[in-house]
Image (cartoon, helix red, strand yellow):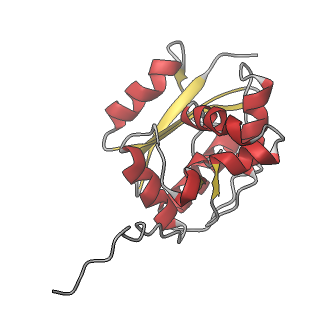
Amino acid sequence: MTGHRYTIFETEGGFCGIAWNDAGITRFQLPTDSERATEGLLLRRLVQAQKSPPPSEISNTIALVKRYFSGERIDFSDIRLDLAGQDEVFRNIYAAARRIGWGHTTTYGTIARELGLGPEAAREVGQAMAKNPVALIIPCHRVLAAGGKIGGFSAPGGSNSKQRMLELEGVRLTPPEPAQQSLGF
């Protein structure tokens, strides 16, 4: 097995980065405003990675990412990933997240219950999403906090980026109704 290779590319959402090895994609960096910032974030986790032209399988994934950020409905569930180093619970959580289709959302607690972990494991699901090495391809942006609240997002731009990605997919998160109605006087 050879080491990690990576490339940086531009989309309508900004500059993204992707890293891979012979087993599959190992990291994906969501958009930033500059090629340099994206490369820095990607290399923070893969210090030894070498910049490289992408092979055809990676080029095909890059084309899908570009189409996604231009608003096209894309399914990343068949993309080959290398999640070596992730524990079994996180790999199961990631597999569940990959089944969430375009324009759909779920919650941390729902994934925990689906995996038989119980609602108390919602926090662990949230931790897995925060550590997701291939955000977008494993669609952690589609996993919300309890009550359909946006929840956190560790990508550049935080929860604003999560909301923009959901909006690309036609998901509109409305603010909660006020707890008290104002009086008309």
Residue 141 falls left or right of residue 74: left
Whole-percent x and y of residue 64?
A: 61, 56
Q: Position of residue 46 (x, y in %)?
A: 53, 18
Q: Residue at x 42, y 28 (%)?
A: 41
Report the front residue among 123 and 35.
123
- Count how many numbered circles sit on residues in the image: 0
Extreme residue in the top direction: 48
Residue 144 in view of the camera: no
**Camera sees residue 29:** yes
Q: Residue 32 sits in which quadrant?
A: top left
- Furthest toward the right, the residue is 116
List the single residue furthest toward the left.
185
| Depicted 142 relative to depicted 180: above or below | above
Q: Quadrant of the N terminus?
A: top right
Picture coordinates of residue 68, whole percent (x, y): 55, 60
Q: Nearer the viewer, residue 130 or 149?
A: 149
Q: At which x and y percent is residue 6?
A: 54, 29
Left or right: 94 in relation to 148: right
Horizontal relation, residue 10 to residue 97: left or right: left
Q: Residue at x 51, y 61 (%)?
A: 166
In the image, what residue occupies the spot 59% across and 24% down? 5
* Residue at figure coordinates x 24%, y 82% from the top left: 183
Work out whether 85 lies above or below 177. Answer: above
Specify the quadrant that holds the C terminus.
Answer: bottom left
Residue placed most toward the observer, 118 or 104:
118
Q: Is residue 161 above or below residue 92?
A: below
Q: Write down the quadrant of residue 83 in the picture.
A: top right
